[in-house]
Image: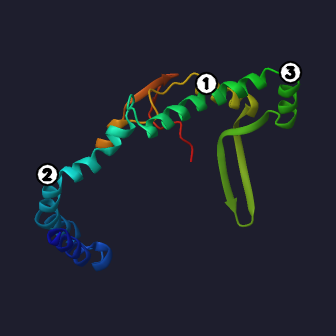
């Protein structure tokens, strides 16, 4: 524990956040990592309790794990598909579909062009416009989720580092894991 506390104190003293970023910041951090932190990590990596904590996401969350958390992940996975399918069924009701289209009609959107601002005036030079239909766009996304294009909601390989794994190819564009997440 003393070694860990020492490594923490050393970081607090050499941290670029505290001392300011300069041309020596990288070398100070490298020395801190190699001399102070690496020995602590090596010691911790041999401890069974630390190994248990470090491997927890793999043993608890991977596909096929017989754990309560994995069961919840599987439920969320199925609920995503079921919800998308249910909303698609609602779209099949003509009166509902017509009401949605009436409330959210297609609109012309600027697809490309230029914008400029001179003093207090603004000018938009619209080169191309595109007819956007929000209801059909939503239907497209719902079909996508209803088809369950993902392998699993948990990518265990991401635990070891970001994985540029392609989950599908659409219109010649590779869609990587997490590309459908909208923040």
The quadrant in which residue 8 appears is bottom left
Image side of residue 75 versus residue 7, left or right: right
Give the residue at x 19% y 75%: 10
Q: Which mark is residue 8?
A: none
SS state under label 2: loop
Q: Secondary structure at mark 3?
A: helix
Given contact means CB atoms under 8 Å apart, are the residues at marks 3 and 2 in contact? Answer: no
Placement of 130 over or under 28, stated as above or below: above
Residue displayed at 45% across by 30% down: 152
Residue occupied by mark 2 = 46
Q: What is the C-alpha distance between the residues marked 3 and 1?
A: 20 Å
Image: 32 above or below 98: below
Which x, y percent locates residue 65?
37, 32
Q: Could you classify mark 2 by the number of other residues whose Cα lies within 10 Å: few (under 14), some (14-19), or many (20 or more)?
A: few
Answer with the quarter of the image where residue 101 lies. Answer: top right
Residue depicted at 28% across the width and 44% down the height: 55
Q: Earlier in the sequence, mark 3 or mark 1?
A: 3
In this rendering, would 100 be left or right of 42? right
Q: Which residue is mark 3?
A: 94
Vertical arrangement, residue 50 with respect to residue 16, above or below: above
């Amino acid at each position: 524990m003393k070694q860990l506390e020492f490594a923490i104190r050393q970081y607090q003293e050499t941290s670029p956040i505290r001392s300011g970023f300069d041309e020596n910041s990288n070398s100070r951090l490298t020395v801190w990592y190699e001399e102070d932190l690496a020995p602590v990590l090596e010691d911790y990596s041999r401890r069974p309790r630390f190994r248990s904590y470090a491997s927890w996401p793999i043993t608890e969350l991977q596909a096929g794990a017989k754990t309560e958390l994995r069961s919840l992940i599987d439920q969320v996975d199925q609920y995503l598909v079921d919800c998308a399918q249910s909303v698609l069924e609602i779209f099949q009701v003509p009166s509902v579909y017509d009401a949605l289209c009436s409330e959210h009609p297609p609109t012309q959107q600027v697809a490309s062009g230029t914008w400029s601002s001179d003093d207090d005036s603004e000018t938009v030079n619209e080169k191309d416009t595109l007819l956007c239909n929000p209801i059909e766009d939503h239907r497209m996304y719902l079909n996508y989720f209803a088809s369950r294009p993902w392998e699993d909601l948990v990518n265990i390989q991401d635990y070891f580092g970001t994985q540029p794994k392609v989950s599908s190819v659409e219109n010649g564009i590779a869609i990587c894991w997490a590309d459908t997440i909208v923040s």
